[in-house]
Structure formats: C-alpha cells, structure tokens
Amino acid sequence: MSDDKTVFALCVDDFGQHAGVDASVCELLQLNRISAVSCMSGAPRWASHSAPMLREREACADYGLHFNLTEDFGSRSGSSLSGLILRSYLHRLEPQGLRTMLQTQLDSFENALGRTPDFIDGHQHIHQLPMVRDALLDIVEKRYANIKPWIRNTRPANPGWGGKTRILKYLGGIALHEELNQRRIPTNRDFAGVYGFDTENYAKCFEEWLKFTSSATLIMCHPATMLDAHDPISKQRLIEHSFFSSELYIKMLDRYQVKIERMSSILSAKK
C-alpha cells in the first residue's frame, strides 16, 4: 500500500453454496481479483470440497464465516428471511439456539481450514438483525478475546443510495455499525454492492460503487461459473464472474485510482 491509490476490499459471498461459486472464487483468487471470501461452513459440500479448495491455495485474501440461518441448500428446511426478520424484531428468536448455531458454524470453519476466521458476516445480512447481532457480538468478544475478527457492517458508502441499500441501512445496519464502534470491534468503514441481481450491465453498477469508494470500503459480490437449479440468482452470478475476470474490471480500478486489499490489512494500517 505504498502508492496513492485508495484501497478497498472486495468480498465474494456464499463460498460453499454450490460448485459454481467455489470454482469462481478459486479462479478469481488465482487472478488476484478479489480480497475476501465469505464461507458457508454449514453447507453440505463445505468440509469435503469447498474448504480443501481453499487449503490448497496460499492465503491471498481474508477468509471469513458467512453466518447462515436461511439457506437450506435445497432441503426446504431453512427459515424464510421475512420470517426471521419478523421474529427478530418481535424478540421471538431463541437466544441459546442462535448462539449454538453460530458456535457450530465457527467450529466447522475452524476445523476445516485449521484457522480462525479473519471476519464474520451474515448470509442475507442476518447477522445485523436484533437478537442475532447480540449473539454474534457476545460470542466474538468471548471466543476471540485476544484478536477479534472484523465484522461487516452495511452502512452505505453513499448515504443517498435508496432501495435495498437504504433498507439494509435501517434494518440493523446503522445499529450494528454503532455497536461495533462502541465495543471497538474492527469493521469496514462503509459498504457497497447492493442491487437487485437483475441487470446485464453489472459493470455500470460496479462503477457507481467505485465513485463513492474510500479507504476501508467493503464491496460484496456474488460470482459463479455455472448455473445451479436451487440458486435463484444463478444467472446473475455468471454475469458478475464475467465482469471480474475481464480486463474491463482492471481498467475500471485504474480509472478510479483504487485497488483491492485485505480488509484486515487495511484496518491494521489505520491503527
């Protein structure tokens, strides 16, 4: 980080969800196009396929836990996101059950990779919901008392963005950001990458996010190399992968004088 470029982190979510996501992550890691991988350690393929793919590679990115309470991996046994949101705001979730699920997924991550997570976030951002974030923060402070993983917050890089970005901001995003700062738990400065998974022109979306990127911004993405019958955003993932493996992506980073870096390194440099 010796030049004048602004550094930010680019994180692929959902590693382990299916083979297409895993293949995309490995290809983009090889090309140095991403700087964080968020892992679904409760996925059926995690220990047997996904984690070994990461172990075979020299760590060139942050590896974290993508805490999951809604994805059922085709079994139709998971909780709906809308139902989870409602129960969290009504305080009708079972606190010990939340803690057990998080501890189990952390155990699975650590056992398979032989290391603690660099960061923690949530599938569909469930980690920022009431009760869920209480369980998360309590466990992080107790389990990682010495070196804490950074935790994703969804405070938007541009306060003027609307739609899903604004919904996330008020659906626990701001509350989690404030609590992380109060507890002095590392976190990204702000966040981008939210859209409707409904456009052929993903490059235009990414360029909009880069316009508001500053040091320690986190941008999430969801690429994959193949379709999956159980994945509702599968077609859009192919478009994202095509963009991130292209020269257009590299030229866009150069045009906006930004580059990707591990969030753990960015935050350490700011201390």
Image (cartoon, grey):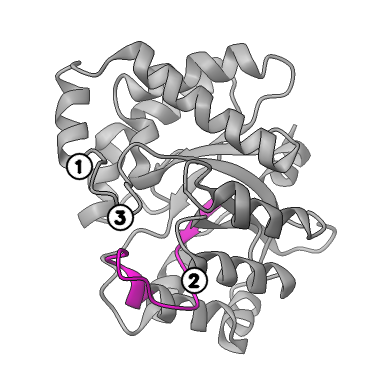
Q: Position of residue 183 (x, y in %)?
A: 54, 16
Dominant SS in magenta: loop
Secondary structure found at label 2: helix
Q: Amino acid at mark 2?
A: Gly
State the residue in front, 112 or 129.
Answer: 112
Badge 3: few (under 14), some or many (20 or more) residues near its Cα, within 10 Å?
A: few
Q: Which residues are magenta?
A: 217-236
Point out the image quarter for the C terminus: top right
Question: Which mark identifies residue 46?
Answer: none
Q: Is residue 253 visible?
A: yes
For the point 60% across and 11% down, which residue is it?
A: 142
* Residue 49 picture location, percent across and down: 61, 57
Which three-letter amino acid code belongs to the residue tagged 3?
Gly
User: Where 2 sits versus 76, above or below?
Assistant: below
Question: As drawn, which residue projects farthest toward the bottom?
Answer: 247
What is the C-alpha distance between the residues marked 1 and 3?
13 Å
Is residue 110 depicted above or below 263 in this figure? above
- Say which residue appears at 68% left-offset and 34% top-offset: 111
Image quadrant where residue 186 sits:
top right
* Front position in the image: 252 or 257: 252
Secondary structure beneath label 1: loop
Identify residue for label 2.
20
* Callout 1 amino acid: Ser
Mark closest to the chain's N terminus, 3 or 2? 2
Q: Nearer the viewer, residue 25 or 243?
A: 25
x 28%, y 15%: residue: 94
> Which of disc 2 and disc 1 is earlier in sequence?
2
On whether residue 203 falls in the magenta region, the answer is no
Disc 3 target residue: 74
Q: Which residue is mark 1?
A: 80
Q: Quadrant of the N terminus?
A: bottom right
